[in-house]
Image: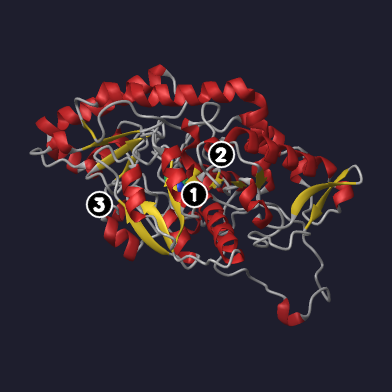
Amino acid sequence: MSGPSRDKQAGLLLDEPLIFERNRPGQMGVDVAEVEADGLLPAELERAELEGMPEVSEPEVVRHFLRLSQWNLSAATTFYPLGSCTMKYNPIANEAAARMPGFAGLHPMTPDGLAQGALELMAELQDMLAEISGMDAVSLQPAAGAQGELAGMKMIRAYHEDRGDPRRRVLIPASAHGTNPASAALCGYEVAQLDGNAQGVVEPDAVRRAMSSEVAALMITNPNTLGIFEREIAQVAEIVHQQGGLVYLDGANLNALMGVAKPGHIGADVLHFNLHKTFSTPHGGGGPGAGPVGVRQVLADYLPNPRIVRRDDAWAWSSDAPKSIGRVRSFFGNFGMFVRAYAFIKALGGDGLTRATQMAVLNANYVRARLQDTYHLAVPGLCMHECVLTDRNLEGTGIKTLDVAKRLLDYGFYAPTIYFPLVVSGALMIEPTESESLETLDEFIAAMEAIAVEAAEDPDAIHAAPVRTPVGRLDEAKAARKPVLRWRADDSAGG
Ligand SMILES: *Cc1c(COP(=O)(O)O)cnc(C)c1O
């Protein structure tokens, strides 16, 4: 078989074939001593040859996987302004804490009496999240924001059914994340869309018109996905409550509120946290998520089981809550993420969390102020932790949001979220988070400005982008429908 292709290499931008293509018969990773296997296994299970397995030396195996890992981008490798996703830096100290043998090696079926430290950490994390959000009780169990939404909507459903008033509709603003209507629909609700005003904000009058005794809940994101604070949230919540409905607050944007405003004090009855966004635990390919739910007293009976309780001066698990929606996740959730989030909150403290929020909002507004003339700003005025630009000012150049995103990769930046929220045409949603320095923001802004100049002077260069990545521009529809997972530099021409 042929060795690694060198055509595509530019300096140390390393090409990497499949491990099977590194196969050199006779190469070996580990030198295993000959074993006298006679009689150890039934004859039919003994194999003279391991057919189809690559034969590769240990250094080549290490290089293979290390190179593949280097094709991953993350907040540890580059600025990663993926709006709504809060790709903040994941502190190394969190990793050290999560790898402590007492945490990392703990079996989920360890008896409560031998897992007191882990239980106490979880109980404390619940309390800290309740304090940050102004909610009365928290369950850490859901494995992601979307699952937290599902758990929250199930609690809302159980609450209404319990009162003999099963309602059938949920109100959701047009700017919502797609998981909101999906979670409501999974709970059997019909979704009614609420249109925002010109600033994308939900107005009390719109809620008043849509509200009825058939509405179980309003699901609202604050700040909304345009990065704008829903100023009327308290009044909106009151309108919903007056007609017996509940308010679900999508807490994914807590990075704009933490330490400054508490959702529980502005009308939310239930919310989810994304530990992998706000509380710095790894995100995407880097680790599982964690989407704890917090509730006000009105929903406390319905929280998932089991719950952590204090019994005979010790921590214990209890499922003694008959109205609970039950279990939503095996065991107790993604425990390693709890350790990381706990470490993050403890390291920053209350003042540090407030400062993180302020820096996140300041960074987003710096990017907004510097780019709002070059690009077009979806909603004029101040933003919260993210700003939404559009490709409107590029009209006539043939360059669109997708092209800008692809070209950014050539400049060494991960692309912002694009074409979301759906209510903005050609959206480029930029969320720098508090992690970034002024120098990094300036470099990013310079790249965005350079792309705008290229769009006017040399649009073809952008249409071809990215040209400095291992794989060039893909046909996105084809890549989704007919994925070619076996990639070779030779056949990459044309995508
Ligand atoms: C990320 C996000 C979600 C879903 O959270 P996951 O943890 O990805 O499941 C929901 N709503 C908003 C606004 C989000 O940004």
Q: Where is residue 209 in the image (x, y as percent from the top left)?
A: 32, 53
Is residue 485 found left or right of 116 in the rendered image? left
Q: Residue at x 57, y 66 (%)?
A: 161
Residue type at the position of mark 1 = His
Instruction: Measure how far apart labels 3 and 1 are at the Cα level.
Output: 59 Å
Instruction: Measure how far apart labels 3 and 2 are at the Cα level.
Output: 54 Å
Q: Which badge, 2 or 1, comes first in the chain's sequence?
A: 1
Question: Crowding at label 1, few (<14), some or many (≥20) Cα neighbours within 10 Å?
Answer: some
Q: Where is residue 184 in the image (x, y as percent from the top left)?
A: 46, 60
Q: Which badge, 3 or 1, comes first in the chain's sequence?
A: 1
Question: Crowding at label 3, few (<14), some or many (≥20) Cα neighbours within 10 Å?
Answer: few
Q: Position of residue 306 (x, y in %)?
A: 74, 56
Location of mark 3 (residue): 493
Instruction: Measure how far apart labels 2 and 1 are at the Cα level.
Output: 14 Å
Q: Which residue is drawn at 24% across and 39% down?
A: 198
Residue at the outermost top position: 439
User: Looking at the image, is 34 positioned above or below residue 452?
Assistant: below
Say the numbered circle drawn on residue 241. 1
Residue type at the position of mark 3 = Ala
Q: Nearer the viewer, residue 493 or 456?
A: 456
Residues at circles 3 and 2 in contact by the CB criterion of under 8 Å: no
Q: Quadrant of residue 397?
A: top left
Q: Where is residue 301 in the image (x, y as percent from the top left)?
A: 68, 55
Say the numbered circle drawn on residue 264. 2
SS at badge 1 = helix
In this view of the protein, can residue 7 be seen by the observer? no
Residue type at the position of mark 2 = Gly
Q: Which residue is drawn at 19% across and 25% down?
A: 373
Q: Nearer the viewer, mark 3 or mark 1?
A: 1
Residues at circles 3 and 1 in contact by the CB criterion of under 8 Å: no
